[in-house]
Image: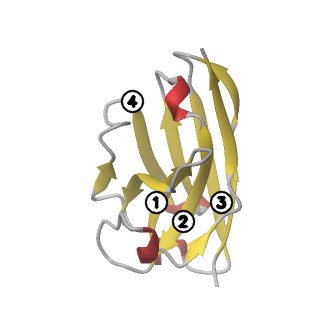
Amino acid sequence: QVQLVESGGGLVQTGGSLRLSCVASGAIFSAYTMGWFRQAPGKERDVVAAITRFGGSTYYSDSVKGRFTISRDNAKNTVYLQMNSLKPEDTAIYYCAASRILRIATRQTDYAYWGQGTQVAVSS
């Protein structure tokens, strides 16, 4: 059983930056592909970025490519999402998730474990 706790959300102006962190416990962190998802009000939860167990492969949605960076530190059991050049349309609850799939995973159903989410709000 994996427990995930996100932090780092907040309110930022357009063009600003935030770094989200997700700390995992209860399992061997390096055994999991990790992903970040987000859900805006009235919309479905969508994948933002994903990273394989040792960081060899990453994935970004088209909407964040070039602005967001996913990384992980297996020694700290932590995955990060660096978000730069933030836009109002990035406003959402951001969720960290863990998957046992040994490749990039982009579907919600690929992920068995989820954090509680952290709110990101970008003002115009």
Residue type at mark 1? Gly
**In front: 22, or 108?**
108
Label 1, on which residue?
A: 35
Circle number at residue 23: 3
Q: Position of residue 60 (x, y in %)?
A: 33, 47
Q: Position of residue 23 (x, y in %)?
A: 65, 60
Pointers 1 and 2 in contact (C-beta within 8 Å): yes
Q: Residue at x 28, y 59 (%)?
A: 56
Judging from the image, what secondary structure is the residue with disc 1 in?
A: strand
Q: Which picture quadrant has residue 66?
A: top left
Q: Amino acid at mark 2?
A: Ala
Name the residue tied to disc 4: 67
What is the CA distance from the residue labelled 1 to the residue labelled 3?
12 Å
Quick check: marks 3 and 2 in contact, CB under 8 Å? Answer: no
Find residue 8 and report its horizontal and vertical position in percent.
69, 40
Lower sequence index among marks 4 and 1: 1
Q: Give the number of the disc on residue 97.
A: 2
Residue located farthest toward the front when viewing the structure as drawn? 42
| SS class, disc 4 | loop
Q: Secondary structure at mark 2?
A: strand
Query: In the depicted view, which residue is nearer to us: 57 or 60?
Result: 60
The answer to whether 67 is drawn above or below residue 85 in the figure is: below
Which circle's residue, 3 or 2, is located before the other in the chain? 3
User: Would residue 80 be found to the left or right of residue 120 on screen?
Assistant: left
Distance from Cα at disc 3 to Cα at disc 2? 11 Å
- Tag nearer the camera, 3 or 4: 4
Which residue is rendered at x = 48% and y = 74% of the image? 111
Secondary structure state at the residue bearing disc 3 = strand
Relative image position of residue 79 (x, y in whole percent): 53, 55
Residue under the point 43% across and 46% down: 70
